[in-house]
Amino acid sequence: MITYSRLFIGGTWAEPSNPDLLDISSPHDRSVIGRAAQAQPTDIDRAVAAARASFEAGEWRLTPPAERIATLRRFNALREENAENIANLISLENGSASWFTRAGQPGLTRQANAYLKAAEEFRWEETLVPSDPESPVRSVVRREAIGVVAAVIPWNSPFSSATSKILPALLAGNSVILKVSPENSLSMGFLAELLERVGLPEGVVSVLPADRETSEYLVSHQDVDKIAFTGSTRAGRRIAAIAGEQLKRVSLELGGKSAMIILPDADIDRAVAGVRFGSLLNNGESCIAQTRILAPRARYEEVVAGLKDLVESLKVGDPNDPDTFIGPMIRPDQQERVRDYIRLGIDEGARLVTGGPHVPEGLEKGNYVTPTVFADVDSSMRIAQEEIFGPVLVVIAYEDEDDAVRIANDSEYGLSGGVWSADEAYALAMARRVRTGTVTVNGASVAFEGPFGGFKASGIGREYGAVGLGTYTEYKTITV
């Protein structure tokens, strides 16, 4: 049993205002695996006050960038040393299959290294050459920290979401309150332990698990200067409204309903194999999952048959079993939500190729869903438009490449997507026509040096690399 009875506020472990601990349940069998304190508004006030005091004092903000980089490089090394424990904790509390949580650890290193490299090359201060050589005015442009950052993250990929925000925020010199989901109290408690060992100045960072109401209290707090949020589009709209009312800086990484376009010349076997990781990673609980599979009419049944074979070959079960590919949903309500969508797909008239709303045999004690494929799906169906956040794929036929682009863009979302083709130039041409923030070609992985974020209802702003670092800074121009 893992217990966190205190809260990490301003770099120290403090008694919570509410001493009652929340039971953390296993998605696998719903047994209690841990208990943790949950932040209340009073605790938020303490964390924000500590962050504000540390920022105004300037001990971290005025530290030279090279020293901030060195500190966070130590944090990255410390996280790497504890990668196995991190992976185990996430599998335990999230139900993410162990192959996924372990495979994600090198990705965290690449993400951090991209931020550190960006910070080393960042133009923190530069003198501009005047357009008029006779001008007596010289301009010095600085990039400075914004202030107190409220970073609010979801439960599905906690370490990646956390470090994608706290690393650039801290590299830029901000103070940070990281608000995490109650479900992730154990892994994020361990993250707080790592941050404590790094030795940041007092008040610079807090890690607080809390419910939605307390989260809204944090983002509404008058002493918060920027909100960095990852989560649902619905919650993002609410946060954007609060930020607009208070003129806070805001970046939002929101939902997705991404399309994978399989072009007529693609190797169908390779493309279908790519669905394994591009569409069903992390039990399907991924905002970038390419769950709309667009297949050419002439090869439609070939794609459908391949997906049926693939999905039926994947083992569903205990996330700690190395043979398991798909584990349980994180909570019972999420399990029921996904099952309801499967029922909806049947009611809408889609063809159920494999799967269904039943719970896999022998896994009734957990939050399990049977991986499902629907064919004969029209783009107007709700299962083709709404983010299901589970192992459910819809296969949509298209007539030609213009029709494929039309269907891919027929979504309120625009976070991710993929194109498969034997001709890379052809695939790139198609990728340029899809209105989404990230497009992978032939199963390529996401690059952490480039900006990541969404078009349309998938968000505002970008993360990763130099662009992501820049969103945590303000421009200041000094003329001499």
Image: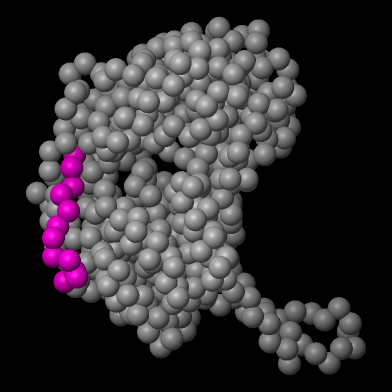
Question: Looking at the image, which residue is at 55% across and 7% down?
Answer: 301
Q: Is residue 74 left or right of residue 134?
A: left
Q: Which residues are magenta?
A: 15-26
Image-quadrant location for residue 406: top right
Q: Is residue 324 left or right of residue 448?
A: left
Name the spot of residue 153 as percent of width and height, x first.
39, 54
Name the spot of residue 368 as percent of width and height, x first.
27, 27
Looking at the image, can residue 446 be seen? yes
**Residue 24 falls inside the magenta stretch:** yes
Which residue occupies the extreme left position in the image?
1
**Residue 331 falls inside the magenta stretch:** no
Name the spot of residue 285 as percent of width and height, x first.
39, 36
Name the spot of residue 292 as percent of width and height, x first.
54, 26
| Residue 441 in the image: above or below residue 73 | above
Image-quadrant location for residue 467: bottom right
| Residue 374 in the image: above or below residue 89 | above
Coloration mode? one colour
Question: Looking at the image, which residue is at 19% across and 69% down?
Answer: 16
